[in-house]
Image (spheres, helix red, strand yellow):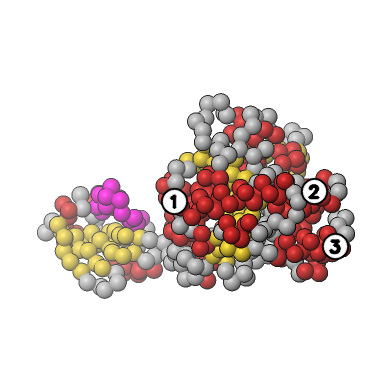
Amino acid sequence: MEFESLKGFRDFYPGEMAARRRVWDTVHSVARSYGFQEVNAPSLESLELYEVKSGEEIVEETYSFEDKGGRDVTMTPELTPSLARMFVSRQQALAKPVKWYSIPKLWRYEQPQSGRLREFVQPNFDVYGVESAAADAEVVAFAHALLTELGLTDEFELRISHRGVVEGYVERYGLDEDDAADVYRAIDKSERLSDDELRGQLRANGLQPEEVDEIMELCSSGGAFTPEVLESAVDVDSERATEAVERLMETSKELERYDVLDSCRFDPSIVRGMDYYTGVVFECFDVEGSLRAIFGGGRYDSLVEEFGGQATPAVGFGMGDATLQQLLERSDEWPEESATLDYYVAVVGDVRDTAVNVARGLRREGFVVELDVTGRGFGDQLEHADRVGADNTVIVGERDLEQGEVTVKDMETGDQRQVPVEEFL
């Protein structure tokens, strides 16, 4: 009987894992260069953690069940609530600001589609303890640096807004809290909806036709992320919206210092669907517009307090691995899917003691080494070395050792040279 992986889940073989490891190594490197420290959280959490903090929509998409202790638990669908819980548990001892990152595996029970799976890896980056626009800008600039280091240049754009821009309009419509939240979720999906579909959802959430027109006009506006564009962004008498634009203008000035404004765009339709977002929000898309958001995030200044901690501002984002891979592949920046092997050590005759020592010496120098452990013939060993992509084969044979040497074969050119065995030992 042959088994297949479940729908929405993936198998990764050595070549694929080698490419992914190169990408994650870059993520680790750039994150550390910006002062982020690595953390991790459990794969299983209390469902209650997400019922209140992430909104009903994500709870409906969780892998949730009752465990043997009668507790309602869920496979972690996104990391921000888990990290906020961790922060609260040690809040007094942590030096602020706290900059954390993690590259966890997450789970959501939803319909698999391009760029969205049921099991996925989502690098997560968060900064706790700083309220300033400078912190917002550095997180966005870090995201830009991360994509740039992965080889992308003009293939992406960062769309930035502030929840308060849309909230400044919606608060005038007299909606109750639930309907207002549904309006924000509908706007959050606008990238994937036709105008008629978006209009229908806004009407279903209680907006009048003229209010729908106003929101539609707002969502289609935007432009360069500059003070000139932002100053004309709000055509409504709303203190909330005015404060939001002022904060965006501060963020724009900070981003100019990082020299990334050319990749940034003001987009009022960016509101983020999670209920915990409170301020500046942002998402990253490919410029062709054919892929899902590469990442998204923003400011969530009330979440720590809702978990029982002291009021603490926070900002961060998560990046989906599937869409990132799609963009890197399309841009010819996805690493080669091949596992590296610097040396294969072939054993010819009764020389195993020396062969093991040769392999140990190479490994001590940091090389990737495979040593024959099968006892197969010399020709089969060379064939295997070629199949696994070894750059070089060290042939440890009885005749060479009588002369105090081993043979090193370049597997690409076929060239061979004799090398004193002491150089390896």
Numbered circle sitting on residue 299: none
At 52% from the left and 30% from the top, the residue drawn is: 94
For label 2, the SS is: helix
Give SS at disc 1: helix
| Residue hosting label 1 | 30
Point out residue 135 in the picture as x, y percentages from the top left corner.
53, 44
Image position, residue 2 (x, y; %): 64, 64
User: In the image, what residue occupies the spot 58% across and 39% down?
Assistant: 131
In the image shown, does 190 or 229 lie closer to the viewer? 229
Left or right, 2 with reference to 125: right
User: Taking 79 as reference, is 257 left or right?
Assistant: left
- Residue 183 within the magenta-colored segment of the rendering: no
Magenta residues?
355-373
Asked whether the beta carbons under mark 2 and mark 3 sit within 8 Å of each other, the answer is no
Q: Position of residue 85 (x, y in %)?
A: 63, 35
Q: Which residue is mark 2?
A: 171
Vertical placement of residue 236 versus 85, above or below:
below
Q: Which residue type does callout 3 highlight?
A: Glu
Residue denoted by label 3 = 210
